[in-house]
Structure formats: structure tokens, C-alpha cells
Image: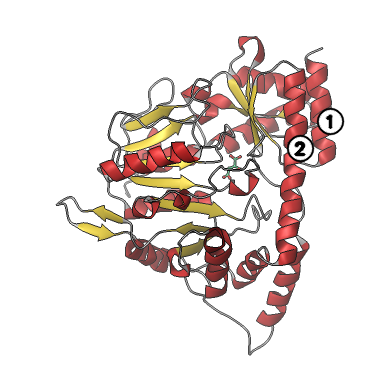
Amino acid sequence: MAYLNENYLKLRAGYLFPEIARRVKAFCDANPEAAKRLIRCGIGDVTEPLPEAVRGAMHKAVDEMGTREQFRGYGPEQGYEFLRQAIAENDYRAHGIEVSSDEVFVSDGSKCDCGNILDILGDRNVIAVMDPVYPVYVDTNVMAGHTGEANESGAYGGLLYLPCSEANGFVADVPAERADVVYLCFPNNPTGSVATRAQLEAWVAYALKHQALLLFDAAYEAYISEPGIPHSIYEIPGARECAIEFRSFSKNGGFTGTRCAFTVVPKTLMARTASGEMHPLHPLWNRRMSTKFNGVPYIVQRGAEALYSIEGKSQVAALISHYMGNAKILREAAVAANWPVWGGVNAPYLWVRTPSGLTSWQMFDRMLQEANVVITPGSGFGSAGEGYFRISAFNSRANVEEVARRMAALTK
Ligand code: MLT
């Protein structure tokens, strides 16, 4: 008989989004008429078609694959040089940030990378996460055996939770305690908050002081609209010595189904062995990718490269402006309903306080049953999310306008 990974048995309930899908399905099966009106503003999944520049590049790549001369088999596990170059040049060097193409690792998603990164980290780290938190950071640490059991509010023993609240604008302050690994996500999923330069400087100073590693998830970077907000942790001096950055084409290029993302591991980033020897992390991640990954398909990488063309950039800008137009409509609807709201300005998510003291799941049920709108309960992101819910702006304009009307009707 094989032994299983008992850490999985510590996981609470299902992963948040499958759990929501299960509840929505049960509601739809029981209410087929209401199911026809259902609008999903739960999971942050894009709805708009792939940009034309991407489709054109992918068609061309498919044709190349149909010729003996240009056919490609296994590609480099780290990503094709044409895409690594385009990323380093456009996302970093064009903004005065030092990142070389061989520090960029192309992958099939930031969610995967955020979990896989634990392969190269030891198991004695003190791990800090913001609360509320993107559940993947927590659950992957549970799976890896880095936590104890969950308590009744769902918090796992051994993790350092950094509370985010209205008082701190949903941006965690640096803690008094030492952590070895800190997950930061800005623009934030789920609250839509962003960190100022001064706040990120404080985090980099903290990491350098404690020789900690910052895992900086910038998947929603393209949604930053206010000037002066850092788009990359590497805008902060010293970050090359303490941070890994995750980025994705999912939310800017509409690649949630197409799958392409990247992780930057600076060659200057070090971590230590139990006996205190310092080693760079870059070769470890390179080794991990070469051993466990065969690279993103050539056709997909050509599509991602096209996002950096002149047409691609303007088509991405149009997508962002579409989703942020949705966010504005939803924000106004929440304000009109007298529901205190955050986010939706530099992020495609709105974070809303539940009315009348409802719990997050009670509000989920109310929105589902009375408005036939799916939202995400804040408590699914951690105990500090209780009493809030998240609305995703990823939708068609018509659906978002209809959601705004239903929110108004709900509060009449
Ligand atoms: C979300 O809704 O939080 C995101 O879609 C999750 C993800 O990107 O994995």
C-alpha cells in the first residue's frame, strides 16, 4: 500500500473557486429559470477575445510548425529567447529596471509558479502571508508540509498572517517578527489595493535586514492606472538581492486559457543552507524548470511575444480599459447602494463590505439567490476577509451593466 502526502489532509474544504462552482451548480440545478439569468463575477477569468495581434502571430506559428524546415519539437525549458528578450526589454529595461533575459523564466502560469517555487526553498522557513490572501500561497505551503493544522477560523499553525484591514488600506505593514519568506501581491488579489513606493521600500528594507525572500506577485500590474505606483518590485533599489517576481499574460493579454506567464529570478538573489552557506537561487530554479518542465508551446510563446508589438500593446490597452470601465460601473453601483468599497481603481477587483452585518457566505447566498450574481466571499481568502466580498470586473459590458441594475434593485 502506498503512503499518501498527509499534508493534503490538513487542507480546509475545497480550493475556493471549485467550491464556489459546486455551490453555484447546486443552485442552478435546483433553479433552472434563475440559472438562465446567472451572471458570474466570481473567479477573475477574462471574457474578451484574444487580441488580433496574438491570433495573427499564433496562426503564423502554426503554419511554421507545418513545414519541415521550421517545425519545432521540445523548446528551451526556460522559454524561447525571442520571448525572454521581449519581456526583459519591454517590461523592465524600457522602464530603467535591470533584468536580463536569462533571468526571465517563461512558464504556463503564475499560479503554477507561485506553488512550484517551493521546490527550491527549504522547509524551515517562517512564511508570511497577507490576510486576506490569494489562497494558492497558503494551500501550496500546506501541501509542502510547511504548516500545522488549521484552526476553527481556517488559519494554519506555523504561518505568519499579516492582517490587512480598512485601517491599513489593505496593505500589510512590515511585522515586528522575523519572516524568511514573504508573499506580496500588488495590485492585490483579492482587495485591489496597491502598495506605494514607500511601502515597498519598507518591505525591501525588511527583507534585506532579515535576509528574507519576497515573493512578489505582480499578475495584475497592467491594471495600475495611478501615476507613481510601482509596477515591479525591482523598481525598488535592493530588490534584486531579495525578491522573485511573478507576472502573467493571463489578465493583460487574455491568456487565462492560452497559458503563458513568467518568473524573474535575479542572479544576485541568494539563500542559505541549514549550515549557513549562501547559494544563488537562479541555478536552482533553472534546474527545477529543466527537470520538471518542458516549456510553453512555441505557438503560445509567439502569441505572447506579439503582445509587445505596437498593435499588441494598443490591443492590450483596449482590453484593460474595457475591464477597468467595468470596474468603474461596479464601483459606482456599490457606492450608490451604500456599500463601502475598495479597489477597482488600479485592479480589476472590487472589495466590498457586506451590508447589514451579513457574513461573506450569507452575502454570497443573497447575491446568488436574489440577484443571480456570483461573487466571491471574502472569508474564502482568509479570516480577515470575513464581512467582505469580492466582485470581479472581468465580464462583458452588458453583463456588468445588468449586475449594476440588480445591485440597485437589491437595495431598494
Ligand atoms: C481569481 O479569481 O482570484 C483568479 O482568477 C485566480 C487565478 O488567477 O488563479
Specify the label residue 126 is tagged with: none
Horizontal and vertical percent position of residue 354: 63, 17
**Mark 2 Cα within 10 Å, few/some/many (few <14, many 20+)?**
many
Residue 339 vertical placement versus 185 (above, below): above
- Name of the residue lying farthest toward the bottom: 69
Amino acid type shown at disc 2: Asn
Q: Residue at x 29, y 38 (%)?
A: 126
Please name the residue shown 30% across and 45% down the image: 208
Quarter of the image containing the C terminus? Answer: top right
Q: Could you tell me how far apart the alpha carbons at marks 1 and 2 are, in whole angstroms? A: 11 Å
Question: Ligand 1: does it lie within 8 Å of the C-beta at label 2?
Answer: no
Residue sitting farthest toward the left: 275
Give the answer, above or below, for where 404 lies relative to 101. above
Query: Whole-percent x and y of residue 158?
Result: 30, 32
Residue at position x 62%, y 25% in the image: 389
Q: Which residue position is annotated with label 2?
A: 326
Q: Give the mark toward the camera: 1 or 2.
A: 2
**Which of 50/241 is in front?**
241
| Above or below: residue 224 compared with residue 78 | above
Whether residue 30 is visible, yes or no, is no
The amino acid type found where label 1 is placed reads: Glu
Q: Is residue 312 left or right of residue 137?
A: right
Q: Is residue 183 visible?
A: yes
Q: Report the front residue among 252 and 298.
A: 252
Q: Secondary structure at mark 1?
A: helix
Q: Are marks 1 and 2 in contact (CB under 8 Å)?
A: no
Horizontal placement of 77 versus 308: left or right? left
Q: Residues within 10 Å of mark 1 (few under 14, many from 20)?
A: some
- The label number, if any, that marks residue 402 in the structure image: 1
> Ligand 1 within 8 A of label 1's CB?
no
* Image-based side of 346 in relation to 11, left or right: right
